[in-house]
């Protein structure tokens, strides 16, 4: 277990997460920097860590920084926060090779963070599968699922008293199938998993602690990667990153109310939709498009910044409503509860950029520096009013 460090700007009296609060957690990988378009282990890497961010103040601020193993590998959804903000889970898909400090090797760690202690603390570390990548917590905080990108499985953990207990694995595909993102539906009865190398998104059926692979598969585009589900459970959005050849890539809309579920719309968003996040209002989705910003100098596909488009989902169709430029080698994005502020991770800048959103346009709202490259993001899950 790594030792706890607290950022100098922490004010312990404010480190309290009540029912009305909303926090964001950024996982920051200290093992990678961008050198001439190549993800490179730095000479003196900082420790992997998480930043706990208070979204209830303006501007948002970091409450605490805690050393926790994490990783850049996979979609930037390596963090999950319990609905009551009592704990969080963080995965680590890679670690430094003990025999070669310039080399990364697969890792399988999931850390449990108690957010009720002052300061927050790592209270448990468990093993998932090879390259434990993305993590999701069900609405009742009784079950956690982790995609194991290096072995084609999903690990199942039961949760009780902020402790995880391994409950088996679900085979998603062959070892090289690359299960990437995972997300529960709001009723907790299903989960979706993007399977990159099999070019599909699969459905899991959840009954208590029993998790099984459904026969239904949906196909929206080439190499599905990030995934988001509406708080109302009416749709999901999948980002298709293609083969990384510089082509414009797509996002696909899945109608979750259709029987069976199906892809109903696919549109072009730009080169490499690294992440996407559905707003708490259930009406908008923001996409972080790397846009060639991590390409090496001289590449014909190199661009100076990422793109940040926002789409409305109306009548099961995408409609673009805003776009701006943001950072280099962007990773995850997050919304506040009001859906009028978004935060975007820039791996190369080692900052989290903020933008105000009025439903029609995006306006810069400052930045939060972090230690290491921000590479995974989560906020408190939104609560949906009855009848919505």
Image (cartoon, rainbow, N blue to C red):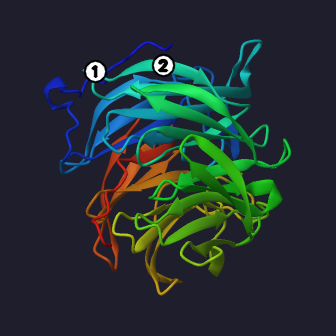
The mark closer to the camera, 1 or 2, is 2
Where does residue 356 sit, x and y in percent of width and height?
29, 65
Q: Position of residue 180 (x, y in %)?
A: 67, 49
The quadrant in which residue 338 appears is bottom left
Q: Nearer the viewer, residue 240 or 8?
A: 240
Q: Which residue is mark 2?
A: 124
Instruction: Kindly report the distance in space between the C-alpha atoms of the residues bearing marks 1 and 2.
Output: 15 Å
The quadrant where residue 42 appears = top right
The total number of labels drawn is 2
- Judge left or right: residue 222 versus residue 113: right
In the rendered image, the residue lying farthest to the bottom is 315
Residue 305 in view (yes/no): no
Q: Residues within 10 Å of mark 2 (few under 14, many from 20)?
A: some
Q: Is residue 59 left or right of residue 279?
A: left
Q: Name which residue lies at 58% across and 50% down.
A: 206
Q: Position of residue 147 (x, y in %)?
A: 66, 42
Residue found 27% across the figure and 47% down from its top: 22
Q: Kindly identify which residue carries mark 1.
A: 119
Mark 1 and mark 2 lie on one chain; the one further toward the N terminus is 1
Task: Kindly state the secondary structure of the residue where label 2 is placed.
Answer: strand
Say what secondary structure mark 1 lies in: loop
In percent of the image, x 35 and y 63: which residue is there? 280
Residue at the image position 57 percent from the left and 49 percent from the top:
207
Q: Position of residue 370 (x, y in %)?
A: 40, 36
Contact check, label 1 and label 2, Cβ < 8 Å:
no
Q: Is residue 117 above or below residue 185?
A: above
Residues 301 and 52: in front is: 52
Q: Which quadrant is the C terminus positioned in? A: bottom left
Relative to 25, say whether 102 is above or below: above
Q: Is residue 100 left or right of residue 361?
A: right
């Amino acid at each position: 277990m790594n030792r706890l460090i607290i950022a100098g700007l922490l004010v312990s009296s404010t480190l309290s997460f009540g029912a009305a609060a909303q926090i964001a957690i950024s996982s920051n990988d200290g093992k990678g920097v961008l050198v001439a378009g190549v993800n490179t282990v730095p000479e003196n890497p900082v420790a992997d860590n998480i930043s706990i961010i208070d979204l209830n103040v303006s501007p948002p601020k970091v409450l605490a920084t805690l050393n926790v193993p994490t990783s850049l590998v996979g979609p930037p959804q390596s963090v999950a926060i319990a609905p009551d903000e009592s704990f969080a889970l963080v995965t680590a898909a890679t670690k430094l090779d003990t025999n070669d400090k310039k080399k990364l090797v697969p890792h399988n760690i999931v850390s449990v963070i108690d957010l009720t202690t002052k300061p927050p603390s790592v209270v448990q570390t468990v093993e998932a599968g090879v390259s434990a990548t993305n993590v999701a917590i069900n609405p009742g905080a009784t079950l956690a699922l982790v995609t194991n990108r290096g072995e084609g499985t999903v690990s199942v953990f039961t949760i009780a008293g902020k402790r995880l207990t391994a409950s088996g694995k679900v085979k998603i595909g062959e070892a090289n199938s690359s299960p990437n993102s995972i997300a529960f539906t709001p009723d907790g009865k299903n989960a979706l998993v993007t399977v990159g190398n099999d070019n599909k998104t699969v459905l899991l059926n959840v009954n208590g602690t029993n998790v099984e692979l459904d026969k239904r598969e949906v196909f929206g585009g080439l190499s599905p990667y990030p995934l988001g589900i509406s708080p109302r459970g009416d749709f999901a959005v999948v980002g298709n990153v293609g083969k990384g050849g510089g082509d414009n890539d797509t996002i696909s809309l899945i109608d979750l109310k259709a029987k069976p579920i199906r892809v109903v719309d696919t549109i072009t968003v730009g080169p490499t939709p690294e992440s996407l996040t559905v707003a708490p209002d259930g009406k908008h989705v923001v996409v972080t498009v790397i846009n060639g910003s991590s390409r090496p100098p001289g590449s014909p596909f190199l661009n100076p910044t990422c793109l940040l488009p926002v789409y409305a989902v109306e009548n099961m169709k995408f409609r673009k409503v805003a776009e701006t430029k943001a950072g280099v080698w962007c990773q995850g994005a997050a919304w506040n509860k009001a859906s009028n502020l978004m935060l975007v991770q820039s791996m190369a800048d080692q900052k989290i950029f903020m933008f105000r959103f009025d439903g029609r346009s995006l306006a810069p709202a400052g930045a939060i520096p972090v230690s290491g490259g921000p590479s995974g993001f989560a906020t408190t899950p939104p609560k949906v009013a009855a009848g919505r």
